[in-house]
Image (cartoon, rainbow, N blue to C red):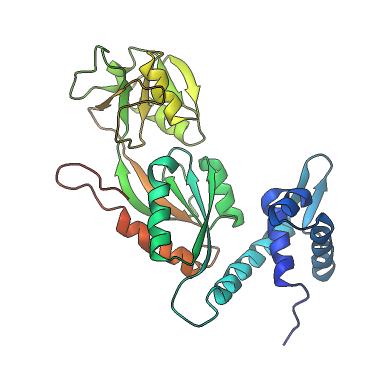
Amino acid sequence: MIPIPITFSQIRFLLAVADEGSTAAAARRLNISQPSISLAISRAERELGFPLFVRRPGLGMAPTTQGARKLQELRTAYLQMSQVFASGDGSATLAGELSLGFMTTLGPRYLPGLVRSFQDRHPGLRVKLHEGDLSSLSNWLEIGRIEAAIVYDFALPSDLDILPLRETKPYGVVWPGHPLADRDSITIPELLDDPLILINLPGSRDFFLSLLQGHGARARIALETESVEFLRSAVASQLGVGLLATDISHDITYDGNRVVRLPLAGLTPPHRIALARNPNFAETEVARAFRRLCTEEFTPPDATGTAPQP
C-alpha cells in the first residue's frame, strides 16, 4: 500500500486556502496558526512536485492550473473520507456537514425552512451556508467549495447537474393607489409606463432584461438594487415599479408600507427554482439526503394555486 504523504487535516488546510484566497484567512477560519497552513502547502507541493498556488502580492493566493485539478481531486477525497468517519459506529444515522449555496434572492424565502426540516430529519448533521449571486455560486460549484446550491435555472453553466424543483412566474410590483393596482393582471408594456426598479445581480438582471426584450419593451431604469426588500420598499415609496420572481407571501415592506403584486399577462417564461451540483465531484450521502428532502418539500402548488411551504 502506498503511504499517504499528507494528513487528513493538512488536506483540510489546503482546501481552506483555496476557498478563502489566503493563508491568513484560512487560518482565521480554521482557528489555527498561519505557519501550520504554510507548512501544509509546502509539504504538499514538495510531494506533488509542482506548485498548488500562485502567490500574488497584495492579492492573496490562487490555484495554479495543475493545482486546481489536484485540489478538486483532494476535495472529492476529503468529502468521501469525511462521510466514512461521520458515523463511526456503523449506524445508518447521517452525520457530518453539508456545504450548501443559495441565491441571495431565494435565501430568506426558502432556506430557513429547508435547513430546519433537514436538521429535524438528521439531527447529527451540520449545514454550512454560502450566500451569493449566480456567478459566485457557479464558481463555487466548479471548485467544490459547495456541494449543492439552491438557484434559479437561468443561464447556468451547461456542465452542472440541475434538479428542477418548482416553477415561479415573474410578476409586477406597484404601490397601492397606482393606476394599475386594481387590475387582475397587466402587460409588461403597461407596467413600464413608469420607471423601473431593477434587481441588479448576475443572472437575475439578465433574466429581467431578456423578459422586457421578449415583449418588445424598453424600460426607464430609476434605480438598481441587489436587494428584493429594497426594491419592494422603493416601490412602496413610489420611486418606480418593479419586477420580481421571488414568491413573497405578504405585502408589507420593511418600512411598514405596502406593495401590490400583479400577475403578468401574455407569455412570460417561468423561473425554475432548482438544485444544482457539479457532477465532477462524487455526491456524498449527506448531499444525496438533502436532494431527497428538496424533491419532497418543493411540491407543486395545490388546486387553489397556493404554493405549500417548503
Q: Residue furthest bottom?
A: 1
Q: Vertical placement of 155 versus 93: above or below?
A: above
Q: Quadrant of the N terminus?
A: bottom right
Image-based side of 257 in relation to 308, left or right:
right
The residue under the point 84% across, 42% down is 57
Q: How far across and down, in percent of the image, does residue 282 sit? A: 53, 68
Q: How far across and down, in percent of the image, does residue 99 sit? A: 54, 57
The residue under the point 36% across, 60% down is 293
**Residue 63 visible, this angle:** no
The residue under the point 24% across, 11% down is 179
Q: How far across and down, in percent of the image, does residue 263 sit? A: 24, 29
Q: How far across and down, in percent of the image, does residue 51 sit? A: 81, 59
Dividing the picture into quadrants, the one containing residue 262 is top left
The residue under the point 52% across, 76% down is 87
Image-based side of 16 in relation to 262, left or right:
right
Label total for image: 0
Please state which of residues 10 and 134 is positioned toward the viewer in this rendering.
Answer: 10
**Residue 296 visible, this angle:** yes
Q: Residue furthest left?
A: 303
Q: Vertical placement of 239 versus 14: above or below?
A: above
Q: Vertical placement of 254 versus 67: above or below?
A: above
